[in-house]
């Protein structure tokens, strides 16, 4: 991609991070750390990769997306708002009783959500079902799912991987947000998942390892996935938990802690400064 296009994606991702901080602050709860680490992935999928239409969220031939690590929905919601699925101000009511945007994705209440999720490991199973349905119906839509690296400790992830490979689901892309931290600490200390690439390869996946904050690498990996036939693809994206906010980066405590007023103001100021810098380069 050219520099202008890359910069536009960076601007959108920065806005997505601002939205995630806005939502969790107003909710006084939520999961900012993993939301910030996945923002670039969400941005690329919705603004460059996937065939979707916010004016017709249930379009039959749309590409499908499942956020298997459903607790990291604040930046997904921000991305959906930027895409035009609903108003930005909805983010301020995140997790409020009766609000559109709940603490985990709800396909019945939120435009643009293809699958309700939150129970770790189950989202990837739903994505497998969607991909198989496309095969049965002779449809060419693709299915994308984002997992957390801690989530890969769930046995259901590997049952799904076995199923995907057995059914030659080359229309399925599993993206692992490898920020290295889960609720109880570093993934390698809680229950190491390495070598993750060899595990997915042994289950029959095409594996691509990338920097999950580099849009050119994200693009290249997704192009490889489209070119891969007869097997699903796993993209292992190395990321930084809390990306973009200095005091949140690589801090496990921000897995599930909302910012207070002072922290909200500092985080927003840092992200808005980065946004101004990026917009100045346009």
Image: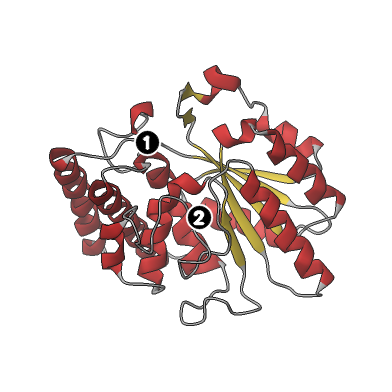
Q: Position of residue 228 (x, y in %)?
A: 76, 57
Q: Which mark is residue 256?
A: 1
Quick one: quadrant of the C terminus? bottom left
Alpha carbons under labels 2 and 1: distance apart: 30 Å
Q: How many callouts does the rendering have?
A: 2
Please name whichever residue, 218 or 19, is drawn nearer the observer in this view of the structure: 19
Residue 282 in view of the camera: no
Residue at the (18%, 51%) spot, across then down: 273
* Numbered mark located on residue 216 in the image: 2
Instruction: List x then y, in percent, for residue 36.
Output: 38, 45
Residue 187 drawn above or below residue 228: above
Residue sitting at the far right = 166
Q: Where does the image place residue 157, in percent across and percent down from the top left?
A: 69, 40
The residue depicted at 23 percent of the width and 51 percent of the height is 26
Query: In the structure shown, which secondary structural element does the residue marked by tag 1 occupy?
Result: loop
Name the residue: 38% across, 60% down. 101
Q: Which quarter of the figure has residue 132?
A: bottom right
């Amino acid at each position: 991609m050219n520099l202008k296009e890359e910069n536009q994606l960076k601007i959108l991702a920065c806005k997505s991070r601002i939205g995630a901080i806005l939502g969790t602050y107003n909710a006084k709860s939520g999961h900012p750390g993993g939301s910030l680490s996945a923002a670039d992935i969400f941005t690329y999928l919705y603004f460059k990769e996937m065939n979707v239409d916010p004016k017709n969220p249930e379009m039959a031939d749309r590409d499908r997306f499942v956020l298997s690590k459903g607790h990291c929905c604040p930046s997904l919601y921000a991305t959906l708002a930027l895409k035009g699925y609903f108003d930005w101000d909805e983010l301020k009511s995140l997790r409020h009783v009766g609000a559109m945007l709940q603490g985990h994705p709800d396909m019945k209440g939120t435009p643009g959500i293809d699958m309700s999720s939150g129970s770790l490991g189950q989202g990837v199973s739903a994505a497998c079902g969607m991909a198989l349905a496309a095969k049965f119906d002779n449809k060419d839509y693709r299915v994308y799912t984002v997992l957390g690296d801690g989530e890969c400790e769930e046995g259901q992830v590997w049952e799904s991987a076995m199923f995907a490979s057995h059914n030659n689901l080359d229309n399925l892309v599993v993206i692992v947000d490898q920020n290295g931290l889960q609720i109880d600490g570093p993934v390698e200390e809680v229950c190491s998942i390495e070598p993750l690439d060899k595990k997915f390869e042994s289950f029959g996946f095409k594996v691509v390892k990338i920097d999950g904050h580099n849009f050119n690498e994200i693009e290249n990996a997704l192009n490889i996935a489209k070119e891969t036939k007869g097997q699903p693809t796993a993209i292992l994206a190395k990321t930084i938990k809390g990306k973009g906010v200095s005091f949140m980066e690589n801090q496990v405590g921000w897995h599930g802690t909302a910012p207070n007023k002072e922290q909200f103001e500092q985080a927003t100021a840092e992200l808005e400064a980065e946004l101004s810098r990026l917009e100045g380069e346009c």
